[in-house]
Image (cartoon, rainbow, N blue to C red):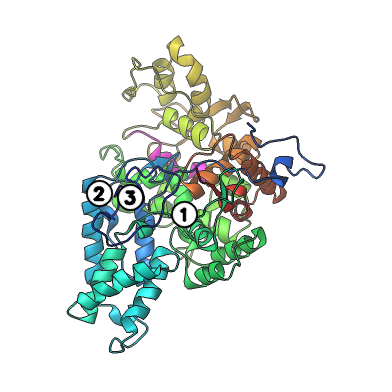
Amino acid sequence: MPGSDDESGTSGGGSGTEQGDDLGEDETGSSDGADEGTDDGEPSSCLNEPSVAEAPLRRFTRRQYANAVRDLMGIAADTQGLDDDEKAGPFDANVTAPVSGVTVEQYRALAEAVGLEAMAKVEDLVACDPAEATCADSFIVDFGRRAYRRPLTAEQSARYLALMDDADTFEDGVRMVVTAMLQSPNFLYVVETSLPDPGSDNIAVLDGYELASRLSLFLWNSIPDPELLDAARDGALDTPEGLRDEALRLLTDTRARDAVASFHTQWLGVDELEHTTKSTELFPEWSVSMRAAMENEMKHFAQAVVLQGDGKLETLLSADFSYIEDPLFELYGVDKPSGHTVGDPVAMDPTQRAGLLTHAGFLAAHAHPDQSGPIQRGVAVRTNLLCTPPPPPPPDVDAIPPSPDPMATTREIFEQHTADPACAGCHVLIDGIGLGFEGYDAIGAYRATENGPPVDQTGAVVGSDVDGEFDGAVELANMLATSEDVRSCVARQWFRYAFGRIEDPQGDACSLEVLDAAFAESDYNVRELMVALVQTDAFRYRYAN
């Protein structure tokens, strides 16, 4: 079970761990790296010793747990009973909070429920005849390798075999083994134990199995398949070229769709739609099905562009097409094409929609229940696309949004609300962006007027490399699509998603420079950015103190 003192660490925040016994009594569960560079543009710091930052120990997110159980056994694990995941930036990442006794009980209950379901699937889980004397051992070796993402030690195999021997039936033995393994820190945590060579400044080369886990968790949000584990065993992941080959293979698998969708919905806050409420009086069309359709739009659009399309960041931010389903046709004012099926691209009005930032899901997630959200939308763009989050407001500032006024526009109300000179320093960075989204109401529907007058959609970007005025979110999206600041920020957001941590400005400097260079060389292809990331120092090494 997770969280014992001598297993993977109760804090979840260490930089490494040793693999301990799985069924024991107490198991619960400087240089900034950026030199001037070489003639070919490669940062010179990346041509010498590897440079990596200290990284916390990671525990599976709820989605990763569910995906792992699905890929191990074809069972749908209900992870809603687990604590909410922590965050690294906008992304789920369990690396900080201690594992409490309550969390341990949550994992126990979930593992027991999955174990019971496994009893009914023994024929699918076991590749041998249970009547054979060696079948139990074969099951443990195979299942354990996949669950732990590396071969079991002899001691681990013996402990699980003892469980099988104590069971009344083979099926019950499978239940007991599955239940125990799914509570082990070796399953729940991203366990990395490779040690540095003497005199290597605490930099350890990850072994093939550790790299396989990193690859699959990044590109599939799940565990390695047998082919990836075989590649780890055979040394195929020991070079950047080998990692690139496997990354390309993983990206052609349908499981890559989950990672791409997960990144974009978390990055832009659309994963929070399930907790978003709207005034039923003002927006009677707001419903569970509408929220689901909004989230699905962003997922399908990102998957299509990144995995099947040109992969370009510019397309993600400025495309005049999307992938929508009922009830979004009515919200967008778009006629459903004849013969349309879910998954078909739909042309959008290019004067109203341009890529991710004009998706109704993004707009609804960053708005109030009864009115649009210029402050929320401005903060979202500054934080997640420009990587320049505004400082928190002073503690004595009234953060309650002003009430809607049928005699005034949202712009007029919020301009009065933020007129305090003490607020101006931050709001000049936020409001010029956020008020440019005033062409969209609280659920993302386009509006040309508000309470009578025409909507003023003008805005201005300041404090970036594309400073200037714009008229409406479509113009803003096209400005941001060409921004070097946005491109750099997107690379860092993918870094955070892949590693479950915020980048270190010193230890990760070399990897980030390499990543930026690869992104630029690919003409800002997000798919190529993902592949480049798995070849960086940050991915191939770990700091082992």
Check if mark 2's residue and mark 3's residue have beta carbons within 8 Å. no
The amino acid type, in three-letter code, at marker 3 is Asp
Q: What residue appears at the point 48 percent right and 43 percent down from the top-left corner?
A: 55
Q: What residue appears at the point 36 percent right and 42 percent down from the top-left corner?
A: 86
Q: Give residue 76's position: percent from left, percent from top.
A: 31, 65
For disc 3, the neighbor class at 10 Å (few under 14, some 14 to 19, many from 20) is: some
The amino acid type, in three-letter code, at marker 2 is Thr
Judged by depth in the image, the label closer to the viewer, 1 or 3, is 3
Alpha-carbon span between mark 2 and mark 3: 17 Å
Q: Give residue 228's position: percent from left, percent from top.
A: 52, 68
The secondary structure type at the circle numbered 1 is loop
Q: Which residue is tagged 1?
A: 192
Quarter-of-image position of residue 208 = bottom right
Q: What residue appears at the point 34 percent right and 52 percent down from the top-left corner?
A: 7
Q: Which residue is tagged 2?
A: 103
Q: Is residue 318 above or below residue 416?
A: below
| Horizontal arrangement in the rendering, residue 172 relative to residue 308 (left or right) | left
Alpha-carbon span between mark 1 and mark 3: 15 Å
The secondary structure type at the circle numbered 2 is helix
Q: What stretch is highlighted in magenta?
A: 355-368
In the rendered image, the residue lying farthest to the left is 168
Front-lying residue, 479 or 139 = 139
Q: In this view, does 545 lie above or below 118?
A: above
Question: Is there any visible trace of residue 447 in the rendered image?
Answer: yes
Alpha-carbon span between mark 1 and mark 2: 22 Å
Q: Which residue is tagged 3?
A: 6
Q: Give residue 407's position: percent from left, percent from top.
A: 35, 21
Q: Give residue 18's position: percent from left, percent from top.
A: 41, 54
